Image (cartoon, rainbow, N blue to C red):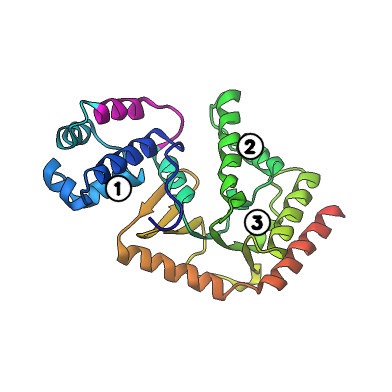
Amino acid sequence: MAGKELDPYTSPEAFLGAELRLRREARGWSQTKLAAVAHMTGSRIAQIELGLVPATLANATALDVALETDGLFARLQQFASRSPSSTDRVRSYANLESAATAISTYTSSFIPGLLQTEGYVRALINNSRLQESDDEVERRIQKRLERQEILRRAKPPTLWFVLEEELLRRPICGPEAMVDQLGHLAQLAHGSTAVIQIIRTDVGAHPALGGTLCLLDLPDRPRVAYLEGAFTGDLFMNPEQVARYALAYDHSRIRACSPAESVDLIQAAMKEIRR
C-alpha cells in the first residue's frame, strides 16, 4: 500500500480495523469478497477498516464467522464499545489524520491543533472545559499534543492552512503565551513544514466562512471532508459532498494573502500584543 498506514494504536476502533484488514489480506480477499461472505456491504467493510465507524456486535460476529477468527472481532468490538477515551467523531478524525498524505484546513475559530503550542493548547482546553475532571482535561491536552507527532515523521503529510486574520488576535491565552504561539506559526510559515495563508478581516464573506473545514487525502482511498463546530463534527465521504467542500476551501484560499504577506500579518499581530 502506498503512503502512510493507519496507526492501529490511535483508538480501539483503529486497532479493530487494522486487524480486520490484516486477516482479510491474509486470505487474499478483497473488501468486496469479504462483504459477500459476511453479508455486509463493501463500503461498510472499508469504513470499519479505516476506523471511520465502529463495528456493531452483529458486524463483528459476521466477520468472525467469515474469517473463522473464533470470536476475535466480537471481543474487540466489546472492548471498543466500552472505551471511554474519546467521542466517536474525534476518534474517527484522528484515525484518518494519522494516515493522511495531505491535510488542507480552513478555520475561523482558533489556531489549528497541528500548529498549536503547549501553552495555547492548555489555555484553549482549560477554558472550554465543561464538567470535566482535571485528569480528563490533561488527557485531552496530551492527545492534542500527540497528534503533532505526524509533523516529525520522515515523510510528514503535505499541510496547507487558511486562517482568518481575527484568530491571530483572539486572546485564547495570556500575552506571553500568545506571542509564543504566533512566533511558532511564523516559524512554520517560513519553513517547509506547512503553507499558511491568512484571510484579511476586511475580505468579507466567502463560502467557507465560519467553523472549521478539513480535507484529508488518504493513500489509495478517496478524499474525505471533515466539518467541525463548537459541539459537532461530521465526516463526509460522498464524492459529490467532498467536491463541494473542496470548492469552498479553494474559494477561501484564493481570497487569502500570499504566504509571504501572511507572515507579515502574523508578525504585525505579535507586535500589537507586545505593546
> Sequence order check: which comes first, mark 3 or mark 1?
1
What label sits on residue 167 in the rendered view?
3
- Label 3 to label 1, Cα distance in Å? 34 Å
Residue 264 image position (x, y, % from top left): 76, 68
Residue drawn at x 58%, y 24% is: 135
Discs 3/1, front: 1
Label 1 is placed on what type of residue?
Gln
Would residue 88 appear left or right of 190 to someone viewing this image? left
- Label 3 to label 2, Cα distance in Å? 16 Å
Residue drawn at x 63%, y 34% is: 126
Q: Which quarter of the rendering shows the N terminus?
A: bottom left
In magenta, the rendered stretch is 72-87
Q: Which residue corresponds to mark 2?
A: 127
> Sequence order check: which comes first, mark 3 or mark 2?
2
**Magenta stretch contains residue 76:** yes
Q: Which residue corresponds to mark 1?
A: 47
